[in-house]
Image (cartoon, rainbow, N blue to C red):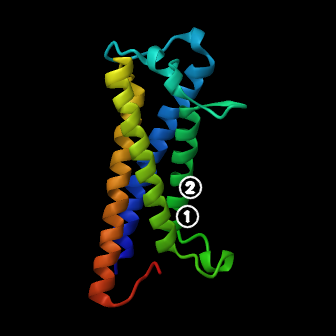
Amino acid sequence: MVRPKINKLLTAIAVLAFIAMGVTGYLIYIKFAPSEGTFCFAGGSCDVVNNSPYSVIDLGFAEIPVSILGFLTYTFIFVMSILVMKKAVRWRKIHPKLSEKLILDLLKWLAVIGSVFSLWLTYVEWRILQAWCEYCVTQQIIILIITALFFKISSTIKADMKENKVCEFC
């Protein structure tokens, strides 16, 4: 049975997503309360990064802080991981083609997109802003770990399907 292995990985993902929710929540807070000043552990430049033009996505009619997008992404990953882990939703009742495996694959690709975006933001901190925000880097590391864990889940399910010719998540 592969479910206990997957549930351990999903537990790790949920814990990491919860931590990242806290980190991005703090970044949201300091974005809207800049007079408070940011507490950076290693003398970083959190305020420089968090107040740069790269800290928002300009939609033309509104600017959305990147930290809000991160918070929403981590919240979604957290909730969906728990729902899959607890088998709390009968996905096929929502749509006949939905399955836990499809949900896990979608979460994996969401994490990949988040990782690519985070790597770009890391490049911006390093080469363009030449300033580091420990909170930003922390969540960037977390999304990379979450992505790796989702790939581990995919390979575990694939190996189990080969071995047992049955998929618990399909």
Q: Which percent across, then down, holds residue 148?
A: 32, 55
| Callout 2 secondary element | helix
User: Which residue was labeled with disc 2?
Assistant: 79
Q: Is residue 53 left or right of residue 39?
A: right
Q: Which percent across, then down, holds residue 39?
A: 44, 15
User: Which residue was labeled with disc 1?
Assistant: 83
Query: What residue lies at 63% left-to-right and 20% top-to-bottom?
Result: 32
- Residue 166: quarter of image: bottom left
Query: What residue lies at 42% left-to-right and 30% top-to-bottom?
Result: 136
Q: Which percent across, then down, holds residue 155?
A: 30, 70
- Cα–Cα span, label 1 and label 2: 6 Å
As drawn, 87 above or below 23: below
Circle 2 residues within 10 Å: few <14, some 14–19, many ≥20: some
Q: Is residue 13 left or right of residue 98?
A: left
What amino acid is found at the position of numbered circle 2 in the picture? Val
As drawn, 151 above or below 20: below
